[in-house]
Image (tube, helix red, strand yellow):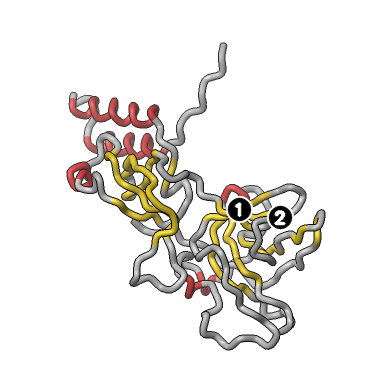
Amino acid sequence: MDEIVAQAVCAQVVAHVRVGGRATIARLCSNSDSSRRGLDILDPAAWKTPLDAPKLVGTRLKEVRFPVGTPVRCYVGDDEWLTGTVVAHNYREPSWPKEQPSAPYQVLLDDEHLAGSERPNAIFAPEDSDELVQLNFRFPLGALAECRVGLDDWCRCTVMGYMYREERWEAGRYAPYQVRIESVLPGSINAEELGKLKGKVIWLTKDNAENIRAISEEREQRLASLLEEKKAGLVGDEEYLDRRRTAIHAAESPPHAPG
């Protein structure tokens, strides 16, 4: 499955200020640098200052709590928290004076904070503290969920672990989840191959709705009913695939209000 590709951000920032005794997160501008499009945001080489780069005078690169790829929420003042993904450590702006420490994190914001807003698509955290940056996994360990395993294929899964990495990955790269596959959602044309994943543990690239979501009995029932229609010859192959694609990607309907 193709990994989600992010836009990079430009270099201008707004200096952070104190709000109620807390330093707010400084915001990056929202213009994109086209030279960095197409890069995998979980590849630290695409974003962060290399650890072996020359140290700036008066600047200390500190060890941080959360690896690149960690889903977090960030305090931005006025009792507001924004969620996103750590994409860089020890972030610096070229315009910063040498004596100014690097920011511990650069965080790419989740899309829900950007729609209809002039908010920039990334921010940085001036301090690595729980007051400003916290873990924000959407699913607890042991939770049942649905995970994406193909363009139009999802499986039921159990969350088994956080922040998985493989030895061959670049330093600092992690995947947010390890999940165990429990079953394939009904009606996949790849059901036989996907069935071999049952009981296997895989990793997911991002903690977002395109990779992992809550289970939906309603959606599963729609898929099962559609499969029965196909078996009964009530729908052709092309119509079946179109309707299944719509059903499997549809959000669960909200509960009906009492009459």
Picture residue at 33% right of the left edge, 45% below the top: 152
| Image x and y of residue 117, in percent | 67, 51
Q: Is residue 121 above or below residue 221?
A: below
Which residue of the protein is positioned furthest toward the top in this rendering?
259
**What x and y, as percent, mark residue 159?**
39, 46
Give the image location of residue 200, x and y in percent. Answer: 26, 50
Q: Residues within 10 Å of mark 1 (few under 14, many from 20)?
A: many
Q: Secondary structure at mark 2?
A: loop
Which quarter shows the N terminus? bottom left
The amino acid beneath tag 2 is Val
The quadrant of the image that shows the C terminus is: top right
Residue linked to disc 2: 76
Residues 103 and 208: in front is 103
Residue identified by numbered label 1: 73
Q: Is residue 91 above or below residue 112?
A: below
Q: Position of residue 236 (x, y in %)?
A: 22, 32
The answer to which quarter of the image holds residue 171 is bottom left
Q: Which mark is residue 123?
A: none
The amino acid marked with disc number 1 is Arg
In the image, is 111 to the left or to the right of 175? right
Q: Residue at x 73, y 82 (%)?
A: 99
Q: CA distance from mark 2 to mark 1?
A: 10 Å
Q: Is residue 123 above or below residue 244?
A: below
In this picture, residue 54 sits left or right of residue 196? right
Asked if residue 120 lies left or right of residue 5, the reply is: right
Disc 1 element: strand
Q: Residue at x 40, y 35 (%)?
A: 215
In front of the other: 243 or 20:
20
Mark 2 Cα shell of 10 Å, populated few (<14), some (14-19), many (≥20): many
Q: Residue at x 32, y 53 (%)?
A: 202
